[in-house]
Amino acid sequence: MSSPDSSILPVLRTASETGHSRERLQSEVVALFDQFREPLLRYLASLGLAFADGEEVLQEVFLALFQHLDGGKSRENLRGWLFRVAHNLALKRRYRTRQDFAARAAPGVEDAVVEPGPNPEDQLLRIQTRERLMAVVKALPEQDRECLFLRAEGLRYREIAGILDMSLGAVSLSLARSLARIARSAER
Amino acid sequence: MKFEDSHLSDQQLLLDIETELTTHDEKPVHDHLEKCWKCRTRRQELESAIAGFVRAQQQEFDSKIPPAAGPRAMLKAQLAQVSVSEPNSLLSWHGLDRRFAWALAGTICGLIAVISFVVHPSQTPQRTPVVSVPDSRLTPGAALLLNRQMVCAGTNTKNKAVPVALQRKVFEEYGIVGEPRAYEVDYLITPALGGADDIHNLWPHSYSATVWNARVKDALEDRLREMVCDGSLDLAEAQRDIATNWIAAYKKYFHTDEPLLAHRSGERIQ
């Protein structure tokens, strides 16, 4: 066969480069999955999603991230991007499955995580304290709860404001209100 | 901001804890905290509330989070599949809600079935989808670990016959019922280019329902093998191009937007 048509060489090179960059991108997305899966799953659970549903949402989130990056879109604050997309997809899924945080059964004794402690009384006290605190959290207005859980996952006020479409002042007020309630419950 | 006569609010104390105070507010808040025991105590209460919440949240969720290995493997597989598909395909799973996509596909199939029943009422309605490109979810392509020398050492470039049982499975996967004589169960990556004898590399290719039929693809396979074996094309690139979109690959390697007439009728190029 004669030498290849020189006009197709640039095309071949580009295709090869694209293949390699996509492989790199896959590795990058998997590394981000490793880094953010647990915080995202915890946040989705706080929105009332079962872990199995949360895992499915995360698959969609990270596929969307791949396409976002593959399309050459912004890499600024990927953590905020992940939480925002996860939040939106979780709300859609929750609406579809009619799951409601308030409707979730409170963890029973069989679900309680018993930590190693010096004695059974201490263990029981810890479980009761935790259950009281989580009951206060569950009774918070939904937006306050979302702010609190996002902050607990390390997001800054500006990021939370972006994810929940609130003002910075509203985020700070919401967190102060929630923590005041938690502090009051601890005093009892 | 002056706090000489009044105490700091929970919001101001929290902003201080979180280092979210503006530079303008920082100094007066710190000055007040230095003097005021009550506000310092309240600040500690808020910090204790944060610590209590974090502990409770960890106990509530952390021990219940399932292991990452399964979801991680699934993500890797899905990414590999997305990577070989068209970057901006119309029905990308990200751009279109999956359920909506399935509902849309179902509606279209339903409409086709109704129309064909109305046009040919005497015939038994049968699903005979036109398949020119494989469904990347069912047939992402699979290749053996072979290098160029190993691929080019083989003299028989004809695809070996796919076992009938495997053919049936392929037709089932693609929802083709009845006697599917209009199709060839084809390798996406041909064995002559290192393609594997695996269901993920097989799909039902229409012989004649479209101009982009099995005979046209055979011509592309011959062309790619020639280029790989004469060193003008990398084997991995040939495999990737044919698996990603064989029609686009045909256009690229034959420099044409339509299948050449000789290929449509099944004549091999010399």
Image (cartoon, rainbow, N blue to C red):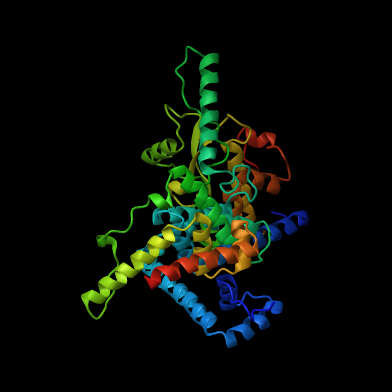
Foreground pick, A101 / B80: A101
Q: Position of residue B6 (x, y in %)?
A: 61, 76
Residue lying at the far front in this picture: please name it.
B5
Residue lying at the far bottom in this picture: please name it.
B34
**Residue depicted at 50% across the width and 36% down the height:** B184
Answer yes or no: is residue B239 visible. no
Q: Position of residue B225 (x, y in %)?
A: 60, 52
Q: Within the image, what quadrant is residue B246 found in?
A: top right
Q: Position of residue B49 (x, y in %)?
A: 45, 73
Answer yes or no: is residue A183 visible. yes
Q: Is A65 placed left or right of A2 in the picture?
A: left
Q: Position of residue B114 (x, y in %)?
A: 52, 20
Residue lying at the far right in this picture: please name it.
A7
Q: Within the image, what quadrant is residue A8 found in?
A: bottom right
Foreground pick, B159 / B52: B52
Q: Is A185 placed left or right of A144 in the picture?
A: left
Q: Is A52 placed left or right of A163 in the picture?
A: left
Q: Is B169 placed left or right of B4 in the picture?
A: left
